[in-house]
Amino acid sequence: MTPILHIQDLTKTYQSTGQTLTVLDHINFSITEGSTVAIVGPSGSGKTTLLGLCAGLDSSTSGLVELNGIRLDTLNEDARAQVRNQYVGFIFQNFQLLPTLTALENVMVPLELRGEKHIKPRALELLDKVGLSDRSHHYPAQLSGGEQQRVSLARAFSNRPKILFADEPTGNLDTETSEKVVKLIFDLNREAGTTLVLVTHDVDLAAKTQRILKVKGGKLISDEPTGVA
């Protein structure tokens, strides 16, 4: 089975005060389509950097990143943005909604970027799925943190992504709200058959995925299945 994401010898270094800082050091793994994977590790271990490279938000120093059969490491920023818009959904810890747009307009943004027509019904359907059909005309500032994250979840699924990257999706939410958002992420993911890759500090959340990649000091130190079907 062809992997949806293939990482080979992935390395990321930065120059800092005349020294080379290695954030990721020769990382290797592949992820099969439709699977759920958590990337865990202490703060500063390189997991968010790894997620950004996998998603084409940043470019590596060396190594190969292949997403849906496309080599991201050989592309410039514009070409990577095109791939992201075509195949990738994102959920961030701080929601990253556009403050001047309503919930509905935020969900429609990825579809508009793709030049799709008749997008309002699709956006409304997704808001309904996350339980926010009655809040569609509210702006982010008028919504609670949990509601904002649900809008970002609807937005993430709007372009029918092949792979969804979630960076600490419950990091800014209380326990009860986190549980609701996590259930929505997994339910929508299962329904859409999307591949899910999430970065989290939350061991309970990581345990809900099928596989856990542990990163420490920029190295992949373990890659274990969880036993979740």
Image: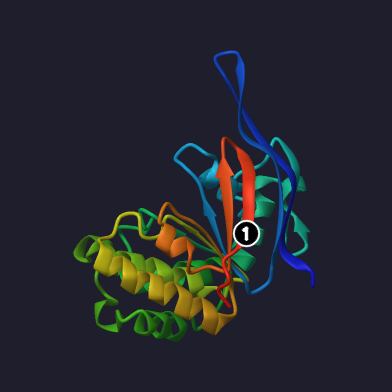
Can you say which quadrant of the picture contains the N terminus? Answer: bottom right
Coordinates of residue 6 in the picture (x, y in percent): 73, 57
* Picture quadrant of residue 55: bottom right
Can the viewer see residue 116? yes
Residue at numbered disc 1: 224
Residue 69 sits above or below residue 193 on the image: above
**Residue at 48% over, 69% down:** 208
Looking at numbered disc 1 in the image, what kind of residue is underneath it? Glu
Expressed as whole percent of the image width and height from the top left, the position of residue 16 reads 55, 20
Towards the viewer: 77 or 100? 77
Relative vertical location of residue 125 with respect to residue 94 in this rendering, above or below? below
Which residue appears at 25% of the width and 61% of the height? 174
Q: Is residue 154 visible?
A: no
Residue farthest toward the left in the current orientation of the protein: 142
Q: Residue at x 64, y 59 (%)?
A: 82
Residue drawn at 55 percent across, 40 percent down: 46
